[in-house]
Image (cartoon, rainbow, N blue to C red):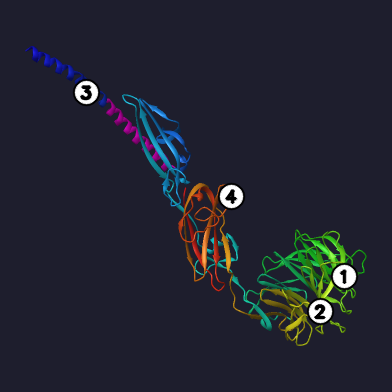
């Protein structure tokens, strides 16, 4: 019995501590499990709170930092810092996400994606055992997406075109601009003509846009030339005297007339069908105004030789306010100014001075124009017209039995202009216009009242062609592939001449830069999509520029650099995220005989 008692005591000594420890552990495990259950509930609550905050707007979680959820009113929001709830410490950490070149999320060494955030929710407590629980979430701003798009001709007209154009062949598109075919004037023909009322000569013509303005005695005729084959009379205006010269700028036509108190008459042509007087201006004495040339906010008016003291033949009129012209300055030449052409700071005058048919005037000072030089052409015939391109001046003279009537003059040094070349017509040249190396003459030469000269070798101009207009041509104007003549013909006072035009093509490259899209605040630009047609050997590619200052426009491709392009619909580079303003640039290329076509473009973004 003693032995059994000793064995029992030994066993009790061994088992009682283990039993006691198990009892204590069981009691603590129950407490820890209760803490864990409560922590799990708090963790879930924080997770739902952050989701609620995100759904109210990306900006609510866009700033990195440590926060805790709090209820404001009846909705969740975030407050800075951690919070303590009984035995628990809870906080939410918002941090950046980095992606590699393939777009996969990586821990470090990648590019920050401003449209994705990592959310780490942590719960910790110290009793009965120090413990930490956490959960990681990733939120993206790609929610409630919207789009900006360009698809109509009106949309595409708002951007900037370089060798491209917006058309409306199939609802609106962009393509490379067409190139005009070459024009040959070896066989000119009449494209269209108009018989004006009566048998008065048309003495001057000016072309602007879709309209030609012609002087028919005292009447200004406005002719629609949008279809050169069928010009039509749109409107007319009767001046107080014979109209000797016309120039048009903006919504006003400026007339040089014989009216004693309205040598410069300003006509409002905003409505071409019903032109009305805008102003009449008396220049000097009663001598007639012979011509007018508009350059900027000044009208340069030539007059017939005046014997009145203080009345000058060359006049500069300020037309900053067209309805209230005022004289700025003038110059006395003691002879008639027949025509004026402005180039740079100089006015080139065709005069009746037989020793200074070309008179050059420095107009740098509008209040004090000064003679800069003269050129005395051979012979004694007066100069009827002048045309200037840079410092090369073309003079058209009346018939001179002793020599040429057409002169090319180098006026690079105005004080000493020099002869470049000349051409003899054998009759009056009443008007001249120049395009490139081609000169167009309005003449009185029988059977050749319209003449075209080749000036490729300016020292020796040669005849390309002549055309019998059956009446004297008085003046000439150029626009596009056409020459417009003011004629003395009784039934064809206004005529449109054309050369032979070869087929045109397209520019070989061009760009279209969109207008600025303002989203109101920073957004995430996600995806570029477009529809295009790209025939063989043509191509369209894109770059995107975004910023927050509406000023810094750096165009980049899918790798975020200026050296790459988007060539197919794809996700936008991360650099495009978290910005407010966007533009896109389309680059179009082709072989010259075909063009790619951009039908529409869309950019998906997340507010």
Q: Nearer the viewer, residue 255 or 149?
A: 149
Q: Position of residue 129 (x, y in %)?
A: 32, 26
Q: Quadrant of residue 454?
A: bottom right
Q: Disc 1 designates what residue?
A: 374
Q: CA distance from mark 3 to mark 2?
A: 124 Å
Q: Position of residue 373 (x, y in %)?
A: 87, 67
For marks 1 and 2, the one nearer the N-term is 1
Q: Secondary structure at mark 2?
A: strand
Q: CA distance from mark 3 to mark 4?
A: 72 Å
Disc number placed over residue 550 in the picture, else none:
4
Residue 54 painted magenta? yes
For marks 3 and 4, the one nearer the N-term is 3
Do the residues under discs 3 and 4 have CB atoms within 8 angstroms?
no
Instruction: Evaluate whether residue 126 shows in this view.
Output: yes
Neighbourhood count class around disc 3 (C-alpha, 10 Å): few under 14, some 14–19, many 20 upward: few
Q: CA distance from mark 1 to mark 4?
A: 53 Å
Left or right of 35 on screen, residue 252: right
Q: CA distance from mark 1 to mark 2?
A: 17 Å
Q: Nearer the viewer, mark 3 or mark 1?
A: 3
Q: Position of residue 36 (x, y in %)?
A: 30, 30
Instruction: Evaluate whether residue 262 shows in this view.
Output: no
Q: CA distance from mark 3 to mark 1?
A: 123 Å
Give the residues drawn in magenta, as a range: 31-56
| Whether residue 476 is situated above or below residue 599 in the rendered picture | below
Q: Residue at x 85, y 70 (%)?
A: 417
Left or right of 18 on screen, residue 45: right
Disc number placed over residue 422 in the picture, else none:
2
């Amino acid at each position: 019995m003693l032995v059994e008692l000793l064995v029992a005591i030994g066993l009790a000594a061994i088992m009682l501590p283990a039993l006691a420890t198990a009892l204590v552990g069981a009691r603590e495990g129950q407490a820890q499990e209760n803490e864990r259950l409560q922590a799990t509930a708090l963790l879930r609550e924080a997770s739902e709170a952050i989701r609620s905050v995100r759904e109210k707007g990306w900006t609510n979680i866009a700033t990195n930092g440590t926060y805790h959820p709090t209820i404001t009113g009846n909705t969740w929001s975030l407050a800075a810092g951690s919070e303590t709830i009984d035995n628990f410490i809870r906080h939410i950490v918002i941090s950046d996400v980095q992606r590699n070149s393939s777009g996969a999320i990586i821990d470090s060494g990648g590019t920050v994606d401003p449209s994705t955030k990592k959310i780490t929710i942590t719960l910790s407590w110290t009793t009965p055992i120090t413990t930490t629980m956490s959960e990681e979430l990733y939120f993206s701003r790609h929610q409630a997406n919207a789009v900006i798009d360009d698809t109509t001709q009106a949309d595409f007209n708002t951007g900037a075109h370089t060798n491209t154009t917006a058309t409306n062949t199939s609802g609106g598109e962009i393509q490379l601009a067409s190139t005009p075919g070459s024009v040959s004037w070896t066989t000119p023909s009449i494209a269209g003509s108009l018989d004006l009322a009566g048998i008065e000569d048309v003495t001057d013509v000016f072309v602007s846009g879709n309209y030609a303005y012609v002087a028919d005695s005292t009447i200004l005729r406005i002719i629609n030339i949008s279809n050169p084959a069928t010009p039509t009379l749109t409107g007319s205006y009767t001046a107080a005297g014979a109209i000797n010269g016309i120039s048009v700028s903006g919504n006003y036509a400026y007339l040089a007339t014989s009216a004693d108190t309205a040598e410069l008459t300003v006509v409002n042509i905003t409505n071409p069908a019903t032109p009305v007087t805008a102003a009449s201006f008396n220049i000097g004495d009663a001598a007639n105004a012979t011509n007018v040339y508009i350059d900027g906010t000044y009208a340069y008016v030539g007059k017939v030789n005046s014997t009145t003291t203080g009345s000058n033949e060359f006049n500069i009129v300020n037309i900053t306010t067209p309805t209230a012209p005022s004289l700025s300055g003038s110059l006395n030449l003691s002879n008639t100014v027949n025509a004026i052409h402005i180039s740079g700071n100089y006015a080139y005058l065709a005069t009746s001075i037989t020793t200074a048919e070309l008179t050059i005037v420095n107009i740098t000072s509008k209040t004090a124009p000064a003679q800069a030089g003269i050129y005395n052409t051979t012979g004694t015939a007066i100069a009827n017209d002048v045309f200037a391109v840079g410092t090369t001046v073309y003079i058209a003279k009346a018939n001179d039995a002793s020599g040429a009537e057409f002169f090319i003059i180098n006026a690079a040094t105005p004080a000493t202009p020099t002869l470049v070349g000349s051409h003899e017509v054998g009759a009056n040249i009443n008007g001249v216009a120049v395009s490139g190396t081609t000169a167009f003459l309005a003449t009185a030469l029988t059977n050749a009242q319209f003449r075209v000269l080749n000036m490729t070798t300016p020292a020796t101009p040669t005849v390309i062609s002549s055309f019998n207009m059956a009446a004297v041509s008085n003046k000439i104007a150029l626009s596009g592939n056409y020459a417009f003549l003011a004629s003395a013909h009784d039934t064809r006072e206004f005529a449109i001449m054309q050369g032979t035009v070869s087929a045109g093509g397209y520019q070989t490259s061009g760009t279209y830069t969109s207008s600025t899209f303002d989203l109101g605040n920073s957004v995430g630009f996600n995806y570029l999509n477009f529809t295009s047609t790209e025939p063989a050997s043509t191509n369209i590619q894109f770059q995107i520029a975004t910023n927050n200052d509406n000023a810094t426009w750096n165009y980049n491709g899918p790798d975020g650099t200026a050296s790459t392009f988007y060539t197919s619909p794809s996700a936008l580079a991360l650099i495009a995220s978290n910005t407010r303003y966007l533009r896109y640039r389309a680059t179009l290329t082709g072989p010259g005989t075909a063009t790619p076509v951009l039908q529409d473009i869309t950019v998906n973004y997340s507010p």
